[in-house]
Image: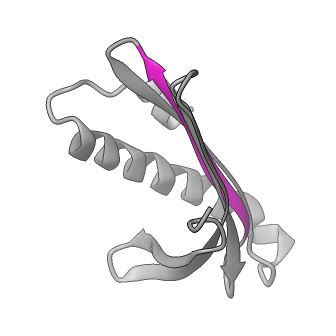
Amino acid sequence: SRVEGATFTGYTGLGRLALVDRMRISTIDWDPAARRGTCEVEKLGPVLQGAAGFVVAADGDGSTVDWFERVTVPYLPRLLAPVVNRLSALGFAYGMRRLAKLVEPGRPVDRRRVDG
C-alpha cells in the first residue's frame, strides 16, 4: 500500500509541554467482510521509541477502538520509569476522552475502556 512506509509527526504531551513524536506507518489493513481495520506505527524517536497501533471494529451501530502502545524513552533512568508510565497513562486517557467527544458529540464515553 502507498500508505505503509509513510511518515508523520505528532505531538505527545499537554500544551507547550509536548514532545515531537515522529512515526512511520508499518501496517495498515481493512477487512470489509469483518468490518475491521488495523494500523500499526513505529515510533522513530528521538525521545519516544517503540510501536503503537489500533484496531477499529464495527460494534452494533457504532465502532470500538482498541489502542496499544509499547513505548520506551531510551535515555530515561529506570528509577523514573514508573512515574513516567503513570503520567503517560493519565495523559493518554485524557486524550482518548477528548477524541471520543470530537468523533461523536453527545455520545457517552465508556470510561472503563478509555481509562483501563
Q: Quadrant of the C terminus?
A: top right
Question: Between residues 35 and 102, which one lies in front from this camera angle?
Answer: 35
Residue found farthest to the top = 60
Residue 56 belongs to the span the image colors magenta: yes
Residue 114, given in percent of the width and then of the height, sits at 47, 35
Q: Residue furthest bottom?
A: 46
Rendered view: 85 above or below 78:
above
Q: How many marks?
A: 0
Direction from residue 102 to residue 1 in the image, left or right? right
Q: Quadrant of the N terminus?
A: bottom right
User: In the rendered view, would you say 8 is above or below 46?
Assistant: above
Q: Quadrant of residue 84?
A: bottom right
Residue 105 at x, y percent in the picture: 16, 36
Comparing 82 with 35, the one in front is 35
Residue 3 picture location, percent across and down: 56, 66
Q: Is residue 59 above or below residue 74?
A: above
Left or right of 36, for residue 45? right
Q: How is the rendered protein coloured? A: one colour
Residue 103 vs residue 112, the one in the foreground? 103
In the image, is residue 66 part of the stretch drawn in magenta?
Answer: no
Task: Give me the residue at 30% from left, 48% from top.
Answer: 98
Q: Which residues are magenta?
A: 50-59
Vertical side of 75 occupied by 83: above or below: above
Q: Main SS of the magenta segment?
A: strand
**Residue at 49% from the left image edge and 53% from the top image edge:** 92
The residue shown at (21%, 25%) is: 107
Task: Spot the residue most to the right.
Answer: 78
Asked where in the image residue 76 lies, by quadrant, the reply is bottom right
| Residue 27: percent from left, percent from top | 69, 56
